[in-house]
Amino acid sequence: MKIFIGADHQGFRLKNKLIEYLKKAGYSVKDSSNQRLNPEDDFPVFAAKVTNSILTSNDSDVRGILICGSGQGMNMAANRFRGIRACLGYDRDSVRLARNDDDSNVLCLPAHILDSDEAKIIVETWINTPFAGASRYIRRINELDKL
């Protein structure tokens, strides 16, 4: 699995911790955000970089993780791109359902709410939950792509 990750200044520290964690776990990770903390950066820039990378990737299993203060801004920005199904990850149950039912391909995390240990548990749940592939779920995803 290839994972593109992006964060604004509010998610910068959590992003770095997650990159280290994911690489140690054996995932291919591409950092699509600033390498140095910039308190003036804006989340839509990184949401666009990550989502465009996913949409243009030739990899068969590619996902994205976006991090900002609340997770809300990144979620709103990512879901503007057709083919992206971003979910907001506050707990394991929400991300498990987002993967199982909706085949979420982007996870948005709130750096002001989660510590790195909580975020790692949520990320692992999201990564390891397969899409159920039920016909009703596929139908709904196709309907989303027509909006």
Image (spheres, helix red, strand yellow):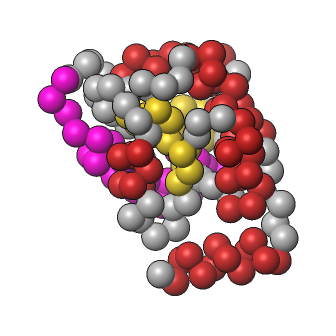
Can residue 5 be spotted in the picture? Answer: no
Measured as percent of width and height from the top left, residue 130 is found at 80, 50
Name which residue lies at 38% across and 26% down: 11
Front position in the image: 114 or 53? 114
Relative to residue 58, is residue 53 drawn left or right? left
The answer to whether residue 54 is magenta is: yes
Q: Eyeballing the image, is 121 above or below 141? A: above
Can residue 43 be spotted in the picture? Answer: yes
Relative to residue 113, is residue 91 drawn left or right? right
Q: Quadrant of the N terminus?
A: top right
Front position in the image: 27 or 68? 68
Measured as percent of width and height from the top left, residue 123 is found at 64, 32
Name which residue lies at 40% across and 17% down: 13
Relative to residue 11, is residue 119 drawn left or right? right
Q: Report which quarter residue 18 is drawn in.
A: top right
Name which residue lies at 41% across and 36% down: 70
Name which residue lies at 36% across and 22% down: 12
Measured as percent of width and height from the top left, residue 31 is found at 42, 31
Q: Report which quarter residue 120 is drawn in.
A: top right
Measured as percent of width and height from the top left, residue 15 is found at 45, 24
Q: Eyeballing the image, is 107 above or below 139? A: above
The answer to whether residue 117 is magenta is: no
In magenta, the rendered stretch is 39-64
Q: How many marks?
A: 0
Q: Report which quarter residue 95 is drawn in.
A: top right
